[in-house]
Image (cartoon, coloured by chain):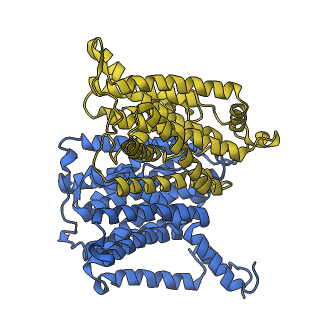
Chain colours: A yellow, B blue
Amino acid sequence: MDFFLQLLVSGIAAGLVYGFIGMGFAMIYRATGVVNFAQGELMMLVAYIAFTLAATFKLGFWPLLFATVVVSVLIGLVIEVLLIRPMLGQPVFATVMVTIGLAVIIRSVVVLLWGADPMPLATGLSRDPIRFGPAGVYPAQLYALGIMAAVVAGLWAFFRYSRVGIAMRATANLQTVALLMGIDVKRIFALSWALSAMLAAIAGVLVGVIYDLEPGMWLVGLRSFPAVILGGLDSVFGAALGGVLIGVVENMSEGYIGRGMKEIAGFVLILVVLMVRPYGLFGRPDIERV
Amino acid sequence: MRSRTYKENYRQLLALTDSVPVVVWSVVLVAVLALAPLLIGKYFTTLVLLMMITAVGVLGLNLLTGNAGLISLGHSGFLAVGAYAAGIVAGKLGWPMPLALLAGGVTAALAGLVVGIPSLRLKGLYLAITTMAFAVIINHLILNGGKLTGGSEGLSVPQPALFGVPLATEGGFYYVVLAVLVLAVFVTLNLLRSRVGRALMAIREHDIAARAMGVDLVRWKLLAFMVSAFYTGIAGGLLAYYTRYLNVDSFSLLISIEALSMLIVGGLGSVAGALMGTVFIFALNEGLSLLFGALGSGLQSSAAFEIKGIVYGLAIVLFLRFEPDGLVGRWRDLKHYWTHWPFRF
């Protein structure tokens, strides 16, 4: 039982990061129909920028998070305007390939600028685990839980009550009608990228604090795909839940089935889930007209 | 100027092309490729060899992604399955090369069937991510395959031999690869202009509409997956004989992405495009290496490697941005311009 609890707690903690990245995927997908394959790389880039910010200005955890989010949102907007917007009207696949190209570029840029050696992201946060009975979590993982709760609540309120949030939902629902109702769809796209970059920044800082910064960080982005697929590509909150689920499943399979299962448990899980529900748990099926 | 094509008998209808220049240039191309090992050095011969192996795999991917419109990020998995299957039957059971290559192709095709079944319900990016999941799982299985696959230690493959005669990599084996490539091109061209090709294209344009017109989606989608995986499996088998040593690390997801970028640069859905894209990406990589070699020791090798990565990514992005039809589209425009000048149409 102790072992189970331990796996559960560390699974949830690891899953939160998947959740943040998965929400970033979903945010862009629901607005634009594009999966941003560079989400993991964006997270890595932002984490390294956070490292430089932390080293230059000696920031604590919260100021650093805030500064990183600001920088990341700017990067997200630049990517949208420079690379994604010109692809409007092209097939979705072409835009997806652009994000894959972007991913390749970012990976190289990061190694070129910061080198390939692992570095800790120092924010003055202690790395001693806090014990809860048999299970232990890092302080940063507790922060992650708190931030996740705040972000989910904030996004829910944003989509529910703010004008812009409602416009975003309308665009996700039916783009043409949204355009006809006077919504500036281009601006909504840009906003989606900005929000997604914000989520990437949070994920990046957390990964940097909990683990280390290293050029293989983008693999976390790859392993977040099951999270967003499980929740349904167009469901932001589904991605958050999916992330936590995947984290737990990965840890459980590693603990009970065998070493190395962590790497593939999520992918196996989504293969099974997609057979039953082709649009994930909370995704909305596309209704096509011929 | 000939304004129309007239077909007067069945032979003309069945011919692959009615254009004499196309035939002549194709023969010239094959002849040049056949003579290449004698003219260019060992280094460039292996480069061309690797390029031809890649082209076989890219042709397979083109069939699935370009013609049937089913996006696959899992072809590195098929490549790995083909390579390991060929490597295992050749190394452990002592099968001769042609049989081993075939075994690689067939095993990959079966894997394609396994991936194809979930694909029947999935669309677009859901499918792409599912195929990616497949590739990740395959790599894991190979890594934990124990003695069968050699795990992380890898697997060594015997020297290629044909009818008991051992083949040198830059000699006999080169011609085997060339023959496989020519065969693959012929089969693909014929496949595409037949009922199969038309069914695949109908599925690409709109699968529900295709179904309404009597295209059996289950049958053709699975067939597309199997044939595509077969090609890639054969390429994997050739790769196994070329490297003589297999390791999971050489079958990363990057391979799938690289193959897709070759397709996009060349032009999706066209055989000529797949070949052109392969040549272009290889030439780009090689050109950059030469450039950094010429710049000398001023740049560290790791920095050069990363800059290559950046240029490579930029090439993909710029092609998609400015030339969405790929090289083959540019070539078409050029021909059009040439024949119709001074008119624009």
For residue A91, above or below residue B272: above
Q: Residue A108, position in %: x, y?
A: 39, 57
Q: Quadrant of residue B143?
A: top left
Q: Residue B50, position in %: x, y?
A: 33, 68
Q: Nearer the viewer, residue A182 or B281?
A: A182
- Looking at the image, which residue is at 59% across and 43% down? A193
Where does the N terminus of chain B fall, quadrant-wise? bottom right
Q: Nearer the viewer, residue B197 or A224?
A: A224
Q: Quadrant of residue B156?
A: bottom left
Residue A32 visible in the picture:
no
Determine the residue located farthest toward the front in the rendered image: A57
For residue A87, above or below residue B43: above
Describe residue A116's horizontal placement relative to residue B198 as left or right: left
Where does the C terminus of chain B fall, quadrant-wise? bottom right
Describe residue A23's horizontal placement relative to residue B205 as left or right: left
Describe residue A108's horizontal placement relative to residue B220 as left or right: left
Q: Residue B231, position in %: x, y?
A: 41, 58
Q: Residue B74, position in %: x, y?
A: 43, 48
Describe residue B157's horizontal placement relative to residue B309 as left or right: left
- Looking at the image, which residue is at 38% across and 36% down? A207
Residue B106 visible in the picture:
yes
- Looking at the image, which residue is at 58% across and 59% down? B197
